[in-house]
Amino acid sequence: MNFAQSIAKPQDGAETPLRSVQIDGQVVMKIVKHCKEQSPTLVTGQLLGLDIGATLEVTDCFPFPSRSASTNAGVDEEADEDEGANYQLEMMRCLREINVDNNTVGWYQSTYLGSYYTEELIETFLAYQENIKRCVCIVYDPRRSTQGSFGLKALRLTETFMEIYKAGEFTFEKITDKSISWQDIVSEVPVTISNSALVSAVMGELTRGPAGDDAADVVQADLDRLSMSTNPFLEKSLEYLSECMDDLAAEQQKVAFYQRNLSRQQLQQAQWAQKRKQENLARRAAGQELLPEEEDANNPAFKTLTEPSRLEGFLITNQVNQYCNQIQDFSQQSLQKLYLVSGAQGVGSVTPGVDSSA
């Protein structure tokens, strides 16, 4: 029994569509702190809260223990998973004793440059959604947040994709029947951050400065947006995008190889059927017993070919789209910053100069 099954509770609002995720400000700070401290190591944690109507409220969270070095050395992974599940149950029991919300509503995980479209994400979602129908995954990217953009998202699997994936065959025929595309695997849920009145008052007091002091309202996030050092981020994004394109080309080659083999097999089957008909015509004319014209299981031409799964290709396509959007957003921001700096310095153009003597 996995952890999701052990903590599953009946949910009255399971049939209500989930429209938004409301996260407490303290929970956001815990997630950011955990992901930043462990970066670049990827970490995960549990989300706790309340499922109310069309809104999923996340009121608390706690981190999962990191895998020990012994696990990487080859220790039984099932024993490690059981130990992790026991830790989570014990943690939730302690939270329940101090009257803290202990209803599981999903999990959070860190990512690097938006690289989170993996089969592991899909399998984790299915493990949770078998018992917690409206769970979400909060994804936080510490690297993107350093560029002045808050890299936090709430993700869910679509119902159509879950039906196909549970059937176990992610083939072209199944995809065509359900009219599903690569964009229909994961959906993003709007996220709102809420704070109590007391927290809002304290934050207002901390950011308030003397009367007439405009600089007092400037925080570190405002300064991060003016950072010109976006080149490393863009270079890494382009590098990962290139790797994804290579992976996508490899997946397309697998599909093309299957299509070629399928066409060759269908041609062999047609030739065999035509040859068998001609043989039967000759045997009928000679008064001999006719040969069966049904498919021969022992004939290599009728051997069933295994169609490659399209899931990996769909996930890679989503990842490519994620990288393209990141590159587009940060390129636009970089260009705007260049125009801002050129205007402040009295430079007429940001276009690199061309050496006429070259």
Image (cartoon, grey):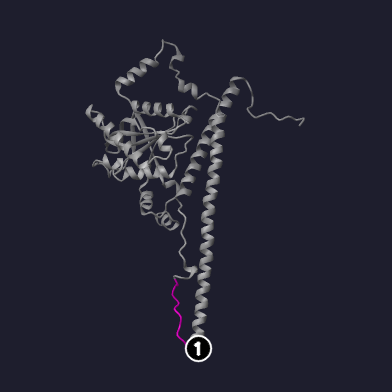
The relative height of residue 209 versus residue 357 in the rendered view (above or below) is: above
The relative height of residue 71 versus residue 38 in the rendered view (above or below) is: below
- Quadrant in the picture for residue 64: top left
Q: Position of residue 123 (x, y in %)?
A: 38, 45
Q: Which of the pair 166/211 is nearer the observer?
A: 166
Q: Which of the pair 178/36 is nearer the observer?
A: 36
- The quadrant of the picture occupied by the C terminus is top right
Q: Secondary structure at mark 1?
A: helix
- Residue at image position (53%, 56%) is 256
- Specify the amino acid type for callout 1: Ala
Residue that extends furthest to the right in the rendered view of this protein: 357
- Which residue, given by chain and number where applicable, does mark 1 sit on? 285
Q: As drawn, is 342 to the left or to the right of 258?
A: right
Q: Position of residue 202 (x, y in %)?
A: 34, 17
Q: As drawn, is 243 to the left or to the right of 2?
A: right
- Quadrant in the picture for residue 58: top left
Residue segment shown in magenta: 285-296
Is 290 one of the magenta-colored residues? yes
Q: Position of residue 129 (x, y in %)?
A: 32, 44
Q: Main secondary structure of the magenta part?
A: loop
The relative height of residue 9 versus residue 293 in the rendered view (above or below) is: above
- Residue at image position (24%, 40%) is 9
- The quadrant of the picture occupied by the N terminus is top left
Q: Position of residue 318 (x, y in %)?
A: 47, 44
Q: As drawn, is 160 to the left or to the right of 309?
A: left
Residue density around tag 1, few if under 14, some if 14–19, many if 20 or more, within 10 Å:
few
